Amino acid sequence: MMSTTTKDREIIVTRLIDAPRELVFAAFTEREHIEQWWAPKGATIHEMEVKPGGVWRYSQPGRNGAQYAAKITFIELDRPTRFVYDYGADGATDPVRTTVTFAEEDGKTKVTLQLLFVTAAERKQAVKYGGIVGAMQALENLANYLATV
């Protein structure tokens, strides 16, 4: 039997956050929380419907000052243990399938982001342009925000 692996197409980032799992899940799925930590300053949320099949569209400024439009389509929500979404530029035909899991550990929450790219080449490109650092930064922003809630 052949085993199929996705290691060459995925990025996995984990962080232990000092907050209860329900709150961490809410911070990932409720607009009033997301606006405090997800996107860089100057980002705009255009629409957000967090449910399977729902869409979240937003734009954020890039280093050159241009606005970049992004789209997330929610695939699965299983509160408070995991959710799955597709992420990419608005209009992209090859979104990144992202699975976020939330595991309780002694009153804290271990958050794991698994980004699964369509091809190994896309993963390599994402790493080159800071995909791993960006995912780690997002979880750091989340931890910092939740420390104030």
Image: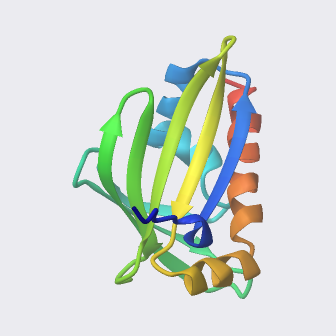
Q: Nearer the viewer, residue 12 or 1?
A: 1
Q: Classify residue 92 by image quadrant.
A: bottom left
**Image position of 12 with respect to 86: above or below:** above
> Residue at the spot x=66%, y=84% of the render?
125
- Residue sticking out furthest to the front: 1
- Relative to residue 9, is residue 92 drawn left or right? left
Task: Indicate whether 119 appears above or below 23.
Answer: below
| Horizontal relation, residue 14 to residue 120: left or right | right
| Residue at x 29%, y 53% (from the top left corner) | 75
Residue 102 position in % (x across, y down)? 54, 31
Q: Residue at x 61, y 58 (%)?
A: 39
Q: Quadrant of the C terminus?
A: top right
Where is residue 30 drawn, in percent x and y? 43, 38
Please tell me which residue lies in front, 1 or 14.
1
Residue at left offset 68%, top offset 40%: 142
Q: Is residue 81 above or below residue 48?
A: above
Task: Tell me, yes or no, if residue 125 can be seen here.
Answer: yes
Q: Residue furthest top?
A: 106
Residue 28 on image: x %, y %: 51, 40
Q: Where does residue 76 sit, x and y in percent of width and height?
A: 30, 45
